Amino acid sequence: MMLIETHEVTRVYQMGTNLVTALDHVTMGVAEGEFVSIQGTSGSGKSTLL
């Protein structure tokens, strides 16, 4: 059983004249008892996913 699930999550934001895709169709699940670590460079969508 999944305690946390995401399905096709996408987040795009504007920085100046550029569109930045922070999350692109992210699907994931976290089951009971699992430990998940989210890593990435600055601006890659870690906090947005949380």
Image (cartoon, rainbow, N blue to C red):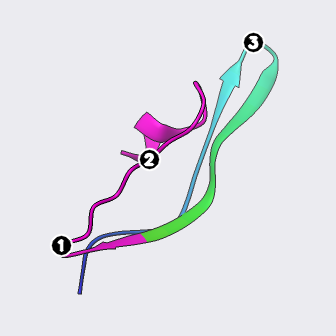
Pick out the residue farthest to the bottom: 1
Magenta region: 29-50
**Residue tagged by mark 2?**
38
Q: Quadrant of the N terminus?
A: bottom left
Q: Amino acid at mark 3?
A: Gly
**Residue tagged by mark 3?**
16
Percent position of residue 4, x then y: 28, 68
Q: Examine the rendered structure and indicate whether residue 45 appears above or below residue 30.
A: above
Residue at 56% from the left image edge and 38% from the top image edge: 40
Percent position of residue 2, x then y: 27, 79
Main SS category, magenta section: loop
Percent position of residue 16, x then y: 75, 12
* Residue 24 image-quadrant placement: bottom right
Residue at 60% from the left image edge and 30% from the top image edge: 41
Q: Residues within 10 Å of mark 1 (few under 14, many from 20)?
A: few
* Cα–Cα gap, marks 3 and 1: 42 Å
Q: Residues within 10 Å of mark 3 (few under 14, many from 20)?
A: few
Q: Amino acid at mark 1?
A: Gly
**Residue tagged by mark 1?**
33
Pick out the residue farthest to the left: 33
* Cα–Cα gap, marks 1 and 2: 16 Å
Pick out the residue farthest to the top: 16
Q: Amino acid at mark 2?
A: Ile
Residue 37 falls inside the magenta stretch = yes
N-terminal of the pair, mark 1 or mark 2, is 1
